[in-house]
């Protein structure tokens, strides 16, 4: 088996509308309704599927809101990322700090979404 990348991740959420609003306004992601009531967030060639905690499919019954932890990359300078988060009253829980990424060092800042999922926004260090 040769794994070469991600297709998507899934976040279990308490309130789909507030989650979509958060990711659209804070991170500039685009929301798409894939089918009636089934939403996803898109950025670049990546997708986050949004799963309503009140309507979980049987295979995801043990999934709980707030258990996600993921990293997205930006070319926006980290000072601008911090300023943008602060302007939206988003509490930074750590960073900016140097971290180890998939292909090298990152400069990262961490915050939580409305369900408590840990979101890391990073710049790749050159």
Image (spheres, helix red, strand yellow):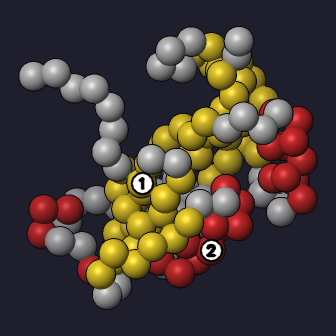
> Which residue is situated farthest in the front direction here?
45
| The N terminus: image quadrant | top left
Write the residue at 67% across / 47% down: 111
Categorize mark 2 by other alpha carbons within 10 Å: few (<14), some (14-19), many (20+): some
Which residue is identified by label 1? 47
User: Is residue 23 at all visible to an observer of this figure?
Assistant: no
Measure the C-alpha gap from mark 1 to mark 2. Answer: 16 Å
Q: Is residue 27 above or below residue 102?
A: below
Q: Is residue 10 left or right of residue 110?
A: left
Q: Is residue 96 left or right of residue 123?
A: right
**First-in-chain label (1 vs 2):** 2
Which residue is identified by label 2? 21
User: Which of pointers 1 and 2 indicates the residue nearer the eye?
Assistant: 1
User: Is residue 6 at all visible to an observer of this figure?
Assistant: yes
Q: Is residue 97 above or below residue 14?
A: above
Task: Tell whether label 2 touches label 1 (CB within 8 Å).
Answer: no
Viewer-proximal residue, 108 or 1? Answer: 1
């Amino acid at each position: 088996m040769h794994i070469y990348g991600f297709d998507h991740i899934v976040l279990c959420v308490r309130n789909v509308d507030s989650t979509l609003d958060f990711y659209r306004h804070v991170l500039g992601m685009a929301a798409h309704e894939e089918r009636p009531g089934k939403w996803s967030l898109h950025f670049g060639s990546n997708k986050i599927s949004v799963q309503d905690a009140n309507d979980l499919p049987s295979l995801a019954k043990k999934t709980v809101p707030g258990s996600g932890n993921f990293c997205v990359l930006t070319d926006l300078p980290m000072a601008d990322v911090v300023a943008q988060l602060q302007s939206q009253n988003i509490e930074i829980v750590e960073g900016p700090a140097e971290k180890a990424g998939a292909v090298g060092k990152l400069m990262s800042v961490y915050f939580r979404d409305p369900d408590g999922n840990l979101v890391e926004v990073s710049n790749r260090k050159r």
